[in-house]
Image (cartoon, rainbow, N blue to C red):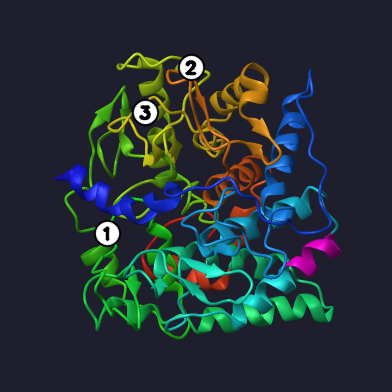
Amino acid sequence: MKKILLSACLLLIGVYGMAQKKDKPAIASDGIKPIGIIKGLSDSALLDVVQRQTFRYFWDFGHPKSGLARERSNVAFDYGNEVVTTGGSGFGIMALIAADHRKFITHDQAVNRMVKIVEFLYRADAYHGVFPHWLNGETGKTIRFGRKDDGGDLVETAYLFEGLLCAKQYFKGTDPKERRIRDVISWLWGEVEWSWYTREGRDNLYWHWSPNNGWAMNFPIRGFNECLITYILAESADRYPVSADIYDRGWAQSDFFKNGKTFYGYKLPLGFDYGGPLFFSQYSFMGLNPKGLKDKYADYWEQNVNHTLINRAYCIDNPKKFKGYGENCWGLTASDNYEGYNAHSPTNDLGVISPTAALSAFPYTPEYSMKALRHFYYDLGDKIWGEYGFTDAFSESKNWYGKSYLAIDQGPIVVMIENHRSGLLWNLFMSCPEIQRGLKKLDFQSPALSKN
């Protein structure tokens, strides 16, 4: 039953890898020059190189009209060169802030890109304030993600606003452009009808609604998985919030929410056995700071650290004897593979390592993530290092080294490395008055919460 539920949860992401082509669309201007392997780098210098090169995915390869993140580096679904992803763009916005902070680009460049992004989103299709999974980056019109998935996608919208709320806190200048960024984000935020997506007041948030198909997708969002941020934002809303009880009666009510068992010596408070793919402990926590974050169900630092350690320990144990696995080569998560795309995990292991898994875990396992980074960069080198950082995945058992890059995998690398180094995105997101209100409403504890 648990495997069926996990498969259903990840089906909505799984089509990322279908019907790929190798055609390449045009890139945005003001590019950052890519660099190859540089020998003898210190840890800090290596992190700079990886963040900078990975950010190129969102900067050089960002859509020239909208500024949003393209879905992937190879064209999917025969839709041409215009597909941009809303959730991946939220990650890209957070990467943009990190790049400005690291001076990979100038502040004026960052401001101008953000103005382009928010002006585009203000005119783009939305459904009760909720954006679709995919947009046409030229026109702002919806590109359907599935036959009935042609309307609002609440989870992708949550990832987008995770980035937008960070931007609202970061771009604090008094000039007209930065004021415009903040104003438009406030308008977009206020128009998200989170309460509509309870489907007339049911106990759950629902993932999809469309004017053509209504609630036909029928996908209640329940934990524990990558969707925690959706409930936090819905509780934090100004105009259309949801009641606090649906967090308990919806999100926390499933047969795979609580765990409490021990794997490889690490207790896992929540979720599937062995924790599931590592993006569960990453996507919601790019802005939401898990340090000291607790509710009545879990200590989220313990949850995320132990999830990561279990994933690594499994790769070291390597029960299926896949080539290459070891203490410096680990990390199972959703990514491309030699068959297409899959949600890799200890219970769904196909011999595929995804660099984003270990690198986006830097805040949780800095020593082990650095060892993995040095192995990926120096030992595997040009097999997986390219113009936008590390390619999506590889399998040494199959002698397969992916060539593609995905927005939802590149973004967390830049952002979570930055959270490890400076806490920048965590500090911005947790300082939002909206988020402070939502977390208090749900009785969360966090050192970041004000006493007022």
Foreground pick, 202 / 236: 202
How far from the left and from the top, in percent, is residue 177? 80, 77
Does 365 appear above or below 97? above
Cα separation, mark 2 vs mark 3, equals: 12 Å
- What is the crowding at mark 2: few (fewer than 14 residues within 10 Å), some, or many (at least 20)? some
As helix, strand or loop, the secondary structure at mark 1 comes to loop
**Residue 21 badge:** none
> Closer to the N terminus: mark 3 or mark 1?
1
Q: On the rendered image, what quadrant is the N terminus found in?
A: top left
Cα separation, mark 1 vs mark 2, equals: 33 Å
Dot 2 amino acid type: Glu
Q: Which residue is mark 2?
A: 327
Left or right of 91 in this view: 129? left
The residue furthest left is 1
Q: Is residue 177 visible?
A: yes
Q: Is residue 149 magenta?
A: no
**Residue 222 badge:** 1
Foreground pick, 252 / 393: 393
Which of the 4 image quarters holds residue 219? bottom left
How far from the left and from the top, in percent, is residue 168? 66, 71
Q: Which residues are magenta?
A: 107-113
Foreground pick, 139 / 426: 139
- What is the crowding at mark 3: few (fewer than 14 residues within 10 Å), some, or many (at least 20)? many
As helix, strand or loop, the secondary structure at mark 3 comes to helix
Label 3–label 1 contact, CB within 8 A: no
Q: Which residue is mark 3?
A: 310
How far from the left and from the top, in percent, is residue 106? 86, 57
